[in-house]
Structure formats: structure tokens, C-alpha cells
Image (spheres, helix red, strand yellow):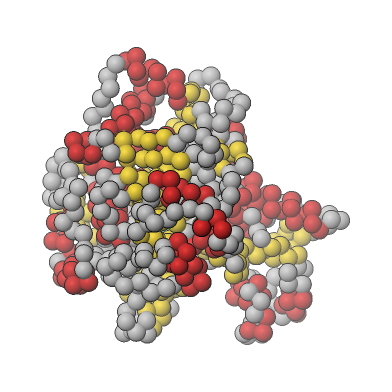
Amino acid sequence: MSFPYQIRSVDQYKAAYEQSVRDPEGFWSSIASTFQWQKPWEKTLEWDFKKPTIKWFAGGKLNITENCLDRHLDKLGNQPAIIWEPNDPEEHHRVLTYRDLYNKVVQFANVLKNNDVKKGDRVCIYMGMVPELAIAVLASARIGAIHSVVFGGFSAQSIADRLQDAQARFVITCDGAFRGNKEIPLKSVIDDALVQCPFVERVIVLTRTRTPVSMIKGRDTWWEDEIKKVETQGSPDCPAEVMDAEDMLFILYTSGSTGKPKGVVHTCGGYMVYTNYSFVNVFQYQPGDIHFCTADIGWITGHSYIVYGPLSAGVTSVLFEGVPTWPDAGRFWDIVDKYKVTILYTAPTAIRSLMGFGLEPVQRHDLSSLKVLGTVGEPINEEAWHWYDEHIGKRKCPIVDTWWQTETGGILISNLAGVTPAKPSFATLPLPGIQPILVDENGKEVAGNGVSGNLCIKFPWPGMLRTTYGDHERCRQNYFATYDNLYFTGDGCLRDEEGNYRITGRVDDVLNVSGHRIGTAEVENAINMHTGVVESAVVGYPHDIKGQGIYAFVIFQGNMQDEKLVRLDIASTVSRIIGPIAKPDKIQFVSGLPKTRSGKIMRRILRKIAEGETDKLGDTTTLLDPGVVEEIKNGKL
Ligand code: PRX
């Protein structure tokens, strides 16, 4: 495939950027017109951030799977679409060509239809990283069902919350998943979740680990049996459902500063255009590239840069089931070597963790196929950046530091590999079509260069969220109400003298642990579920590998005979309620929390204590009981 909108020089970047601001509709419609539409759109853009209403390509009809699969069959039918590397390197890998993937998607789309899944129905997908996860996602999109993928590390309670919020009547899962030396009993977790979700009618279970599972008559069915049924029905075809550009494509739950995770909604047309456009430009994709994004499809990075972006561009994408450190810390490099990966996209936390194993696992492998390196999910520190550059890229691969969010659908700020300059720890410049703005607390623009502020975007782009599922007001409140007429990202940001952006981290009560977003309120609610806990407050602190660690201050009134055991109990309560990723790294027992006279916890003070900056606590005179601060300082872990 060729991409007329691929930017190949700094001058082209400048010209495209200028056009995208002067004539956004012209800019985006010329890109969108290169895709396969069943009917052209009537209006390129309609928007009002106050409501918010955002419509791209309204009236246009399409199906994203025709763009990811059907349109490639003639020329790329025999090219691998997905190379699947299993958890265990001894197990044989699998290659699915575009033709194979198309056949399997169509087949499973028919399975969904046989099970009465219809356009607009929500389908929850809770699976390990197997090709069938991508197949289930695409099959849902094929028939117009809305997928809601839940990361395989979330607990039964988290799944139940998401199923209830989306009122999903269908679940697709595996018996279990292999991750390193662990086996995750996915179906059993689903069974626990479903105790609270009697509205779920059908659970389709793929065999992966062949661990014993309960199969409930009338509700549960094996993936393999369902495939056999379609095979005997004979029709290998499944015409793509006609979707409006603004019909929902998927829901993906993500944490905010308050309440339970919210279901970010992306729609068919804009998301398709944006993921492809950003993929092709940021990574400077060239035919023949082998793209390896190490994220899980359970997160937005996997949705946009394993499934939709790469497949719509006709790329060969590596899908890896396992973890970077098993059987040893050379696993990523082994995969790069084995498949001659050209584009590697991973998270700073993975780089930092692998740095700790020294160079031997790297030097064992030939990494000369690599052309482009990328990072995502959190700020990358300079040390990790240089290690990545020197030891993985051998100083010949541009590194793209890509800033974006679940809500943005795709990368908004990043250098374009080898085209616009990189700067360690800076995401650098916005993609053409993206108009960032920095504002102070009062929403006043912080203009010029060499300044800091809160990062907002002032003009819509096709990949942005449209709503939060079932609660549009929450979407308005969260993203569009803080500052008038702006989308607020929740991130703090610095703009250097040359206009490069550096994202400094969240300015709200959201943590970023190993690149995963976790709300402090969510973790506190989970800790407070423990019988002995009276109250808790959670903050982040700098963590060498995870970026941020979770520090919990807990008032405990239960039996405290064995402090270590109580800590483990609290951690396992959090694990049960949210999932292992939200377990606190440190739990400090305190007799009180620093509160204002109106009862509000002063997190600023707790954050400083957790960060070890106890001499910079600022004004504590407004506290109800300033004495409590001394006690907390003295007990710091
Ligand atoms: O704080 C920013 C951080 O991750 C947040 C978005 O998290 P999530 O929706 O889970 O999506 C992660 C993958 C896109 C942002 O608000 N973040 C993401 N990328 C970067 C980053 N912080 C600094 N630099 C980045 N490149």
C-alpha cells in the first residue's frame, strides 16, 4: 500500500501542519478519502466542545474490517498479517496471512451471529494474547457489535463492574492464559464475575491451557465446537455490516480521578482514519516492515497499534503471548532476531526492567533488522532513553517517544521517525491535525516557548473519544468542563525554547504504574473494603522500574498481631477487588490522616512524604491536627 499522506521531510511536516490548522476539514477529508467507504460522508466535521458533540465524516458508511482485511486480499493475501509468538519459546509459533486472518474473522463473525449477537450489542472479551483475541475483536467489528476488551490481569469484580456498566450479554474468554511461568485461570475468574451478572447469556471459551473449567449448560460453549457448527453450515462468507462513521466501534474502560473506571467510546470512521494516519507517520512504515508492539490488546496501545492501525496499513504485526523476562530477560531480543523485526514499540517500564539484567541477554541476539524504536505510556527518563538508543538501536534507529491516551485513540505528540528530530525525554511535536495548548489553573493560555502548564487540545481530531458509555455528562465533566472550549488531558507539560513538548505526568489523582493508569480513589476504595481498615489515602512515589509506585497510608483498627500479614491481607484485598496491578508497594499504618478543617485529605503533604521530601511540606497550619504530620513523617517506609 502507498500512503499519500506519509510525511517524509521536515518541510513536508511544516506544510502539513500549517494546512491542518488552516483547513482542518480539507486536510482530514483528503486522508479519509484513501480508505474504503461503502458510501461517502456528507459532512467532514461537526463539533461543539461544550456539550461535547464531535462528529467526523457524518453520514459516511463503512466497516473497519473491510479496511483492515478485505481491501488487502488481492495484493497482500499471502503476506503474514499476524505472527504469533507463544509464551513458551519451545512451542511452535503461528503465522496468519491476511487471507487466513480474513477467513478466521469471517468464520468467527458467523459464530457470533449464530449465538444471536447483533449490531450494537456489547461483547466483553477477556483473553490472553492469542491470535483468537484479535480475531474476536475483528469479528465483533465485522458484525457491528461493540467490543469491550478487558485486560487479562483484572479481577472478577472489575470484570463484573464493566459487564454491568456496558450491559454486555456476551463474553468471549479462554480456559486460561500462559504468562511467563504462571497460568492465569481466565474462565474461572469470569465464572466469579458472572455471579453478579445474571444478564450474561453466552460465554464462548477458547481452549488454550486446557485447565479444567466449569462449563454451564445453556450458557457456556467451546469456541472450537462453535467453529465446527459454522463449518457444517457451509457458508464461508460474512458480509461486513454497514456502519455509520459515528457508530460505536468499541468501549475501553480506563481509570479517572474519581469513581469507577469509565467506558471510553470510540467510533468507526474517525478512529480508523486516525490510527492508520498516526501509525504510518510516526513509525514511518514501509512495505515489508515487521512491527512488534509489546503491549497487550487489553489496553489502548494494543487496540490501536497491534490491531487496527497496523492491519489497516497492511503490516505484518508480531503478537506476543508472554512477558519480557521469561524464560529469561532476552525474550524481546530473541523475538526481534527470530522474525527480523524492524519496528519495536514498547514501554519505558519494560526498558528499565530489562536494563537491570545487564547487556548479556541483549548481546546474545542479532538486532540489526531494527529500524525504528518507540516508547509509550509514561515519561521516559534519559538514562533509559540512552540505553535503548545505544544498546538496542545501536545509535542508528530513531526513537519515537509517543504521547497519547486511551481517550485520544492514537498518538498525538511524537517525533516522526527519522523525519523530525528526537529529543531525549521529550515527546517533541504535535502531529499535523493536533493543536495543543498549555493553560494555567484558571484556564488562561500560557503562550510562548520555555513555559509549563496543563496540557489541553483546542481542536478536535478524528480519533478522539466521543463519550463515556452510558454517561455523557461524565465525559463532559471529566474532559470538557475544566477549561472552557478545551479538551483537558489531565497531564502537566513543559514546552521548551524550540516548542518541543515534554509531558511531566498527571496533575490529577491518577497514578501511572508501569504505564498503567490507576485512580487513587479506586485503590483507596479497595483498601477500605478490608474489614480492619477505617480509612486510607493513596499517593504515588517515584519507583525505579515502575515509574510510579503505590504508597498507601492506612488507619487500621483490626487485629494487628502480625503487621506483615496484615499488609499482605490488604494487598490481597486490592488484588481481589481490582487486580494485582493495583497492589500497593508500600503500606504505612497511621493513626490519622492530614485533613483540612472541612475534612479533605491533604494529599499534597502525603505525596511529599512518600517522595521523601519531608522538608518541603509547605503550609500545614490549615490542618485540623498538624501533629499527625510529624507521626506520619517519623513512620515513613
Ligand atoms: O500521563 C500520560 C501517560 O499516560 C497517560 C495515558 O494513559 P493511558 O490512557 O493508559 O494510555 C497509555 C498508552 C497511550 C497520559 O495521560 N503517557 C502516555 N504516553 C506518554 C505519557 N507520559 C509521558 N510520555 C509519554 N510518551
User: Could you tell me residue 34's position as x and y percent?
Assistant: 15, 50
User: Could you tell me residue 566's position as x and y percent?
Assistant: 78, 54
At x 39%, y 60%, the residue is 373
Residue situated in front as seen by the camera: 217 or 544: 544
Residue furthest out toward the right: 561
At x 24%, y 65%, the residue is 433
Residue situated in front as seen by the camera: 378 or 570: 378
From the viewer's perspective, is 637 left or right of 414? right
Quadrant containing the C terminus in the rendered view: bottom right
Residue 184 shows up from this direction? yes
At x 75%, y 67%, the residue is 590
User: Could you tell me residue 615's position as x and y percent?
Assistant: 67, 84
Q: Is residue 317 above or below residue 482?
A: above
- The quadrant holding residue 64 is top left
Residue furthest out toward the top: 232
Q: Is residue 358 above or below residue 181?
A: below
At x 67%, y 55%, the residue is 527
Residue situated in front as seen by the camera: 253 or 94: 94
